[in-house]
């Protein structure tokens, strides 16, 4: 039993400085990340690799809003990404809209799709996962069924030389920056606290006056928004897409793994997890192309069995004093 | 002419439906007893097809004769896999969602392993029955005066249906009449209570995992009778169909899965007759989504969401 | 002076399939009072509580809280009317720290962070959990989790408090602390509906007691009356 404590008068200011310490560490990390991504095109670096790194960071941060903060595992997360790529490509190729408008429009389409899928949030646990996965498959089939003049059918669309890779690259950088800033805001806001309460016990949060379905919808929309933006930037950068790769379940899987490896529910976790694993993935890919997916599967299995809260989450669980530094 | 097509669709529907029923049933044993949603189920089935393919090409063993070998091998694999994976899962924050991810990892590994061994090619299990086709019935004047139409079914598919029907009968008998079967059903209803009654939940669960794996293996062999070729990448589609079946039939409700499987097979096959292929494939998912919103406990299930 | 009624149930029914769990229950809770609700296992106590707090949908009847008819409202709307509750098995937010746990019911309030934080630490201090404020809730013992729920209710500051088995599994020292806090809150004008197996503490705290058996109120009145009611004794001991 804890002995009767006395409240220190400056308790709140101590708390504020603790918050500052947390955020300064976090902002250092994202500044380094953003600066290094910013400099790559200027120095003729590996543009494709850095682009995919930024894309995965954005996706992992995005899925963290719904999976980490509310405990819902959207196995069809790729649906939002896919819709983002398609909306961008159709706007650019078919309607001749500038990419600078097409990508934000893709983000909006992600929000619309999230609202359309919002009723699925009534389902819990495994039902939600299965339905979400099915919805992604429905989207994929729908894209290949639509008239070829619009979606290009099962062959997809090719934007060709119409797009500028470097511009797409910087668009992704801006999207990642906004995603990371949103994440840090959420980590400290009351909305974030409400979401975490819902994740741990939705019924109790409801009984405490939290409007569970509305608050959860905010997280869902944020999640979808960033995935759609990332998809849009991807279409801009690569200039080609087809239904199979745009709605590939592996995209959801990798997103989940990267976010989970770092630690869902923390702000730093998904970033750390993604940067580490994308580097490892790059190295492994070059060495053992055949075994790549096998190792990916092995990493998921080991993570789930031995470190379900990820690297950052486990550190925080076992070393309580680290909680002071980690957001 | 439409009658012929419709009848063909019906026969196909029953044949595929029986396979789907079996997939749903084994998946549901896992879901019910272990609260594990097996994302790798499709890969287990494909692995079953490949094992019978290997036995046929290396030893010339007829697929029907390979059934007992596949059954025993898969039961042991499932039994071992349980102890390797599942007990640790209980410690995580959300065991159900974690199981989904865990089995996804297993499925990635299995696909990669199969691709490595068999390469990305699709393979056909080449064997034949005599006669190759059976004409089930003749419809007079189907294509107009004097041009009769026939409903023709490959013998292999009929054999597959026979094996399936037999399995379903044995399985139902096992679940409802034998002691182990009753224990498994009891564990589906209440995992905690059954431990108090003195049943070792671990060995029961391991047996259930073994049973489900063995059923998946058999389904794989049977599947090779029905489809022209096997593809190491085809597992995911099978798993998805399995999920549709168990949600339709009710999570953890083996008989519900049987009915849902046959219904789904009929709808899908008849839809392929009248709709373009992609639309027919989508139909299944649309049914799934509708059912989940209208009747989340499934067509037969009584399980609540909470 | 006639006491003000804050919670009133009339003819409430709730069934699960064929089982009628709550049958035609009438109940009154007055302002600044503690009403006890007792009954053997399966009598329908928790079901009744879940109907009041909106977690279950009742089949028929009426529910008035602070004069507002609110049967089958959603839990958060009931909560915003001023009803707080604890759960039989403590339902804490396990992966966030104690301060954030306690803050949850006040997240919608229009107060600045400093006040919110100070109120949260005060509530924790009242249940002697202040020293553990930076720990995650999952690291608490079962009894401490019950205390955390009580602190959360104090932060919530509702007019009506529903307590479901608050003393189950709590050691005598903590139990005395909880009773002290409950009495204090009652003095401040809060009304309680208290469900418990522990007759000693119920008899000690309650102003009015309802006895539930097989979903029906079989007896009600003050402590002395209920204690000596032959029907209550029959219900508790007759089936034993």
Image (cartoon, coloured by chain):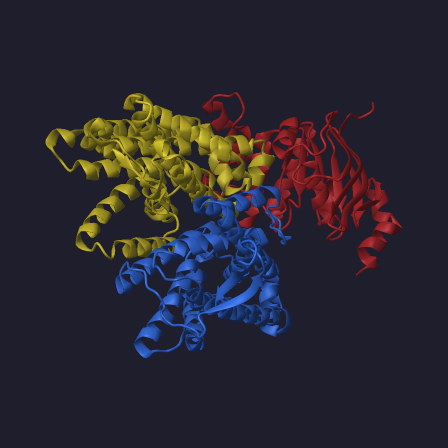
**Where in the figure is residue A103, as x and y percent of width and height?**
32, 26
Quadrant (top left/top right/bottom left/bottom right) for the C terminus of chain A: top left
The residue most toward the left is A43
* The image quarter in which residue C25 lies: top right
In this image, A193 relative to A39: left or right? right
Which chain does the yellow colour mark? A
The residue most toward the right is C230
**Where in the figure is residue A135, as x and y percent of width and height?**
46, 41
* Residue B69 is at least partly visible in this image: yes
Q: Between residues A16 and C64, which one lies in front from this camera angle?
A: C64
Q: Between residues A127 and A150, which one lies in front from this camera angle?
A: A150
**Where in the figure is residue C22, as x and y percent of width and height?**
77, 45
Q: In the figure, A227 relative to C196: above or below?
A: above
In this image, C112 relative to C39: left or right? left
Which chain does the blue colour mark? B
Residue at position x 75%, y 52% in the image? C40
In this image, B61 relative to B303: left or right? left
**Where in the figure is residue A309, as x and y percent of width and height?**
39, 48
In this image, B12 relative to A266: left or right? right
Which chain does the red colour mark? C
* Residue A73 is at least partly visible in this image: no
Q: Between residues C117 and B127, which one lies in front from this camera angle?
A: B127
Residue at position x 25%, y 33% in the image? A239
Residue at position x 40%, y 54% in the image? B236
Q: In the figure, C62 relative to B27: above or below?
A: above
Q: In the figure, C176 relative to B102: above or below?
A: above
């Amino acid at each position: 039993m804890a002995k009767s404590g006395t409240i220190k008068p400056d308790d709140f200011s101590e708390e504020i400085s603790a918050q500052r310490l947390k955020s300064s560490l976090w902002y250092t990390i994202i500044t380094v990340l953003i600066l290094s991504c910013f400099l790559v095109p200027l120095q003729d670096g590996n543009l494709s690799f850095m682009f995919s790194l930024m894309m995965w960071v954005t996706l992992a941060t995005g899925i963290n809003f719904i999976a980490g903060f509310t405990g819902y595992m959207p196995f069809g997360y790729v649906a939002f990404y896919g819709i983002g790529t398609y909306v961008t490509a159709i706007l650019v190729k078919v309607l001749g809209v500038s990419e600078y408008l097409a990508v934000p429009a893709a983000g909006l389409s992600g929000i619309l799709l999230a609202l359309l899928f919002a009723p699925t949030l009534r389902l819990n646990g495994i039902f939600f996962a299965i339905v979400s996965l099915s919805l992604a498959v429905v989207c994929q089939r729908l894209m290949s069924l639509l008239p070829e003049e619009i979606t290009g059918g099962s062959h997809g669309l090719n934007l060709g030389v119409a797009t500028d890779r470097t511009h797409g690259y910087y668009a992704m950088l801006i999207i990642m920056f906004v995603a990371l800033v949103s994440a840090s805001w959420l980590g400290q806001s009351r909305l974030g606290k409400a979401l975490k309460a819902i994740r741990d016990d939705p019924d109790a949060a409801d009984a405490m006056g939290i409007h569970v379905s509305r608050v959860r919808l905010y997280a869902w929309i944020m999640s979808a928004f960033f995935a759609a933006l990332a998809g849009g930037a991807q279409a801009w950068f690569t200039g080609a897409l087809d239904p199979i790769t745009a709605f590939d379940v592996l995209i959801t899987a990798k997103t989940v793994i990267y976010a989970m490896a770092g630690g869902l529910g923390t702000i730093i976790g998904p970033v750390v997890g993604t940067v580490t694993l994308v580097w490892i993935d790059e190295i492994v890919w070059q060495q053992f192309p055949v075994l790549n997916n096998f190792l990916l599967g092995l990493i998921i299995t080991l993570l789930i069995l031995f470190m379900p809260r990820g690297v950052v989450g486990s550190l925080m669980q076992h070393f309580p004093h680290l909680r002071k530094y980690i957001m | 002419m439409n009658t012929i097509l419709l009848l063909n669709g019906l026969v196909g529907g029953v044949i595929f439906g029986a396979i789907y029923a079996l997939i749903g049933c084994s998946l549901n044993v896992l879901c019910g007893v272990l609260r594990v949603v097996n994302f790798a189920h499709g890969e287990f089935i494909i692995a079953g097809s490949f094992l019978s393919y290997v036995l046929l090409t290396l030893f010339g063993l007829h697929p029907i004769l390979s059934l007992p070998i596949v059954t025993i091998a898969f039961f042991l694999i499932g039994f071992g896999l349980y102890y390797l994976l599942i007990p640790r899962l209980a410690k995580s924050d959300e065991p159900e969602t974690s199981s989904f991810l865990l089995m996804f990892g297993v499925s990635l590994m299995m696909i990669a392993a199969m691709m490595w061994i068999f390469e990305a090619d699709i393979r056909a299990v080449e064997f034949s029955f005599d006669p190759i086709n059976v004409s089930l019935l003749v419809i007079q004047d189907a294509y107009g005066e004097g041009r009769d139409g026939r409903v023709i079914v490959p013998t292999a598919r009929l054999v597959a249906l026979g094996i399936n029907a037999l399995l379903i009968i044995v399985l139902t008998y096992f679940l409802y009449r034998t002691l182990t079967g009753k224990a498994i059903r009891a564990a589906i209803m209440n995992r905690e209570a059954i431990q108090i009654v003195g049943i070792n939940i671990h060995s029961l669960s391991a047996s259930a995992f073994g049973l489900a794996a063995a059923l998946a293996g058999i389904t794989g062999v049977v599947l090779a009778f029905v489809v022209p070729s096997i593809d190491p990448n085809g597992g995911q589609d099978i798993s998805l169909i399995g999920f549709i079946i168990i949600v339709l039939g009710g999570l953890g409700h083996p008989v519900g899965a049987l009915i849902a499987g046959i219904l789904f097979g009929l709808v899908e096959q008849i839809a392929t007759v009248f709709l373009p292929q992609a639309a027919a494939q989508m139909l299944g998912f649309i049914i799934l989504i509708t059912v989940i919103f209208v009747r989340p406990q499934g067509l037969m299930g009584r399980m609540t969401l909470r | 002076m006639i006491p003000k009624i804050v919670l009133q149930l009339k003819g409430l029914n709730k069934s699960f399939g064929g089982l009628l769990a709550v049958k035609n229950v009438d109940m009154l809770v007055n302002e600044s009072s503690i009403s006890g609700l007792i009954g053997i296992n399966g009598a329908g106590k928790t079901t009744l509580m879940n109907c009041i707090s909106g977690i279950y949908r009742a089949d028929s009847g009426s529910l008035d809280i602070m004069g507002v008819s609110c049967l089958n409202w959603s839990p958060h709307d009931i909560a915003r009317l001023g009803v707080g509750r604890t759960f039989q098995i403590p339902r804490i937010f396990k992966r966030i720290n104690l301060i954030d746990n306690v803050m949850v019911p006040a997240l919608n309030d229009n107060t600045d962070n400093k006040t919110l934080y100070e109120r949260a630490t005060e509530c924790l201090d009242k249940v002697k959990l202040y020293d553990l404020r930076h720990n995650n809730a999952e690291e608490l013992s079962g009894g401490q989790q019950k205390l955390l729920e009580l602190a959360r209710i104090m932060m919530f500051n509702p007019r009506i408090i529903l307590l479901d088995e608050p003393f189950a599994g709590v050691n005598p020292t903590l139990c005395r602390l909880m009773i002290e806090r409950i009495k204090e809150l009652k003095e401040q004008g809060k009304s309680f509906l208290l469900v418990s197996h522990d007759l000693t503490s119920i008899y000690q705290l309650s102003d009015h007691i309802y006895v539930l058996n097989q979903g029906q109120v079989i007896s009600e009145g003050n402590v002395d009356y209920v204690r000596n009611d032959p029907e209550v004794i029959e219900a508790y001991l007759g089936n034993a």
